[in-house]
Structures are given as C-alpha cells and as structure tokens.
Amino acid sequence: MHKRTKVKITFFVILVGMASMFTAVVTDHWAVLSPRVEQVNATCEAAHFGLWRLCKKAIYVSEADYNGKGCGPISLPGAENCTYFKHFTPGDESEIFEVKTQKEYNISAAAIAIFSLAFMILGTLCLLCSFKKGNDYILKPAGMFFAFAGLCAIISVEVMRQSVKRMIESEDTIWIDYSYAWSFACACAGFCLLFLSGLGLLVLSMPRMPQNPWESCMDAEHEVE
C-alpha cells in the first residue's frame, strides 16, 4: 500500500477520534449520580453531568424495591433542570460540588480537555499541509500533536473519574451510587483513536527502510565511488 494511501486512512481514523472527543467535551453525560431513595411514592433527584453542565432529574419512585437503593435509572421520565458550571468565576461554588476539592477536579478536567482540542486543531493543520508535495516532514509534528491530544483526553478522563470517586466517598454529599455514561465512553474512544493514529503518523514519517539487505549494500558502494 502506498504511503499516501496509509496517511489518508489514518486521517479518516483521526476524524472519527476527533468527532468522539468533541462529542464528549460538549455533552453532559460523563457520569450519573444517584442519591438514596428514602421513601416510595415520592420523587428523588438523580443527576448527570459533564465538563460544563449539571442536569438534575426528578424521578417518581413508586416501587418498594427501590427503597434504600439509588435513585434511577436516569432514563426514567421526569422533569429535568440543567445549570452550567461557572468554573472560572472566583468564589462561585458549583451546585454539584459541595466540597471545594471536587470543584477543583472538574476545573482540571475541563482545562485539560481544552488542551486536547487545541492539539487536535494544530495536528489537523499540520496534516493538511503535509498533503502538499514535498511536505512529508510535517507528518512528524502532526503525529506528535495527535498523540498529545490523546494523552490529554485520557488524563481528563482519569481526573473526572477521581472526581466522581471523591464525591461518592465524601460524607458531605448525598450521592451513594454512580455510573459512567456515553460521553465518558466517547472520551475513552477519542483517546484510543487519537493516540494510536498519532503514533501511526510518527511511524509513517520515518525514512523508508530497505526492503532487502542488498539495497543497503548497494547504497554503501555508491557512496564509496
């Protein structure tokens, strides 16, 4: 397979990875949190959130089997109320983060995700420039940018995971149960596709290896002459 064809296939995989990561950043289904159901025939509030927004849903519980368990599932019908986090407003505490350290986790995850998007943009610009004849050397920085974007994505995922873990373990919050949702899965998929594609571009940017040992010998003889 020709090198140019391999680059185009890798670019297609990168586009899928970029779409997955962008979807994860702009949506709010990273994690679902559930409080304990204290009584039946009443409503409880489950929540799902992402990097920028928290949504709480009032779910009516009518079955005794849910008593003492987590509220949900979030897919049940109910009135939903969404609010945006004011991450960078000094002194403003987000509604979901009842402890300051948990808000700091979410700020970190959002900031790192922005770095991932920035690396994706830089990588795309380099990759488009490499399609011009004689610009194959730009594949190397493009691969590095996409690999960095993937690393930022997985770091953001891990920071968010630690945030959810702290919220569940904290005695200052009402949440007793959690699950990760499809936005979280999109971020994980974005990491895999971007990081592996970035490594692929780095490999493609390397000089062509000789197909057989005689090529190296012949090159050496020409240099001696």
Image (cartoon, grey):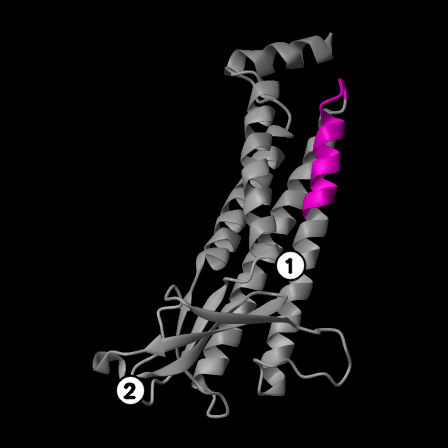
Q: Quadrant of residue 58?
A: bottom left
The outermost residue toward the bottom is 171
Q: Is residue 222 left or right of residue 61?
A: right
The residues colored magenta run: 120-134
Q: Nearer the viewer, residue 72 or 214?
A: 72
Q: Which mark is residue 48?
A: none
The 10 Å Cα crowd at callout 1, few under 14, some 14 to 19, many 20 or more, is: many
- Tell me: residue 217, above or below residue 96: above
- Tell me: residue 225, above or below residue 203: above
Magenta-span inclusion, residue 128: yes
Q: Which residue is mark 2?
A: 68
Residue 138: give x, y in percent of width and height. Answer: 74, 32
Disc nearest the viewer among 1 and 2: 2
Residue 156: give x, y in percent of width and height. Answer: 58, 63
The 10 Å Cα crowd at callout 2, few under 14, some 14 to 19, many 20 or more, is: few
Mark 1 to mark 2 CA distance (whole Å): 36 Å
Q: Nearer the viewer, residue 140 or 10?
A: 10
Q: Which residue is mark 1?
A: 113
Tell me what residue is drawn at x 67 percent, y 45 percent.
120
Magenta-span inclusion, residue 75: no
